Image (cartoon, rainbow, N blue to C red):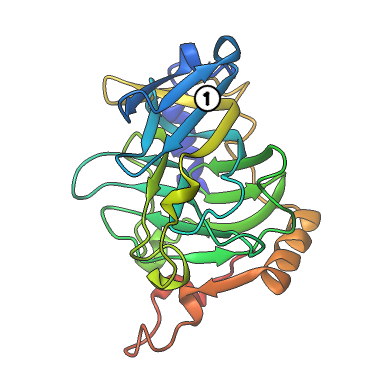
Amino acid sequence: MAKLSLIRASFMAAMVVASASANFVSDVEITWGDGRGKMLDNGELLQLTLDRASGSGFQSKQAYLFGRFDMKMKLVPGNSAGTVTTYYLSSQGPAHDEIDFEFLGNVSGEPYVLHTNVFAQGKGNREQQFYLWFDPTLAFHTYSVLWNPRQIVFYVDGTPVRVFRNSEGAGVAYPKNQAMRVYASLWDADDWATRGGLVKTDWSQAPFVASYRGFVADACVAAGGRPSCSASKASWWDQGLDSNGARKLKWVRDNYMVYDYCRDAKRFPGGFPPECSLPHD
């Protein structure tokens, strides 16, 4: 705790805060897709499209080091098997950090799979997967990442679905030194996305469209390799789960989790990664 307090004191020395305005024109740039990504409604809505030739994607103009990130998304409707819709944070390079929301499509009538992962210093393989308790194609829902020096929390409509704690004391790397941009994409991954690649993309259903709105980043902008933000506005800095949040997390894990790397003994015959023996709520 004392160490975190020292980090906070030095981190907050620069008093500038960034909060994205929920307008894509000012906050993001479409980086690939050759016109398949489009901003609509004066930048309030962004749609990504996938066809047989290409998918599409965008990234935030700013890079961040810690913050709270919210994105409203409406996923590809109908037969979305083989498609992957993403929203994630990532740095660059072989030793990159990354925090992933990936939505794995499915045939009509079957549920999407929410696939989450955390990379630290280039090491990932920390997958947890969930079904959602609603149809994510009918309306916009809010998907959030809280990232502070203590922990990473994944939220769906304000309900925590996953916690990844800073366990450096147990020898587990944690994303804390590399600034990350926010990315989103829609792409074809029918070699693995749906039932391990058994169900392929039905291109007769193309183009596939995923919609984004309401991007908000209450976060510290990294400039010149150093972050800057205001302690008075960084309400997320020490935020964790209260007792109600812990109960919601348990409800999700008990009822909607479909895969946890920390339970996959066949994958780790020599023993589970050290974080698997630590509290998750």
| 53 up-or-down from 252: above or below | above
- Residue 124's x, y, as percent? 34, 61
In the rendered image, is residue 125 in sight? yes
| 87 up-or-down from 190: above or below | above
Q: Quadrant of the C terminus?
A: bottom right
- Residue 267's x, y, as percent? 36, 83
- Residue 246's x, y, as percent? 73, 60
| 273 up-or-down from 238: above or below | below
Residue visible at 81% across and 55% down in the picture: 244
Q: Nearer the viewer, residue 243 or 191?
A: 191
Residue visible at 60% across and 27% down in the picture: 213
Q: Amino acid at mark 1?
A: Leu
- Residue, disc 1: 46
In the rendered image, is residue 15 in sight? no
| 228 up-or-down from 141: above or below | above
Q: Secondary structure at mark 1?
A: strand
Residue 43 sits in quarter: top right
- Left or right position of 161 against 149: right
- Left or right position of 114 against 222: right
Residue visible at 54% across and 27% down in the picture: 217
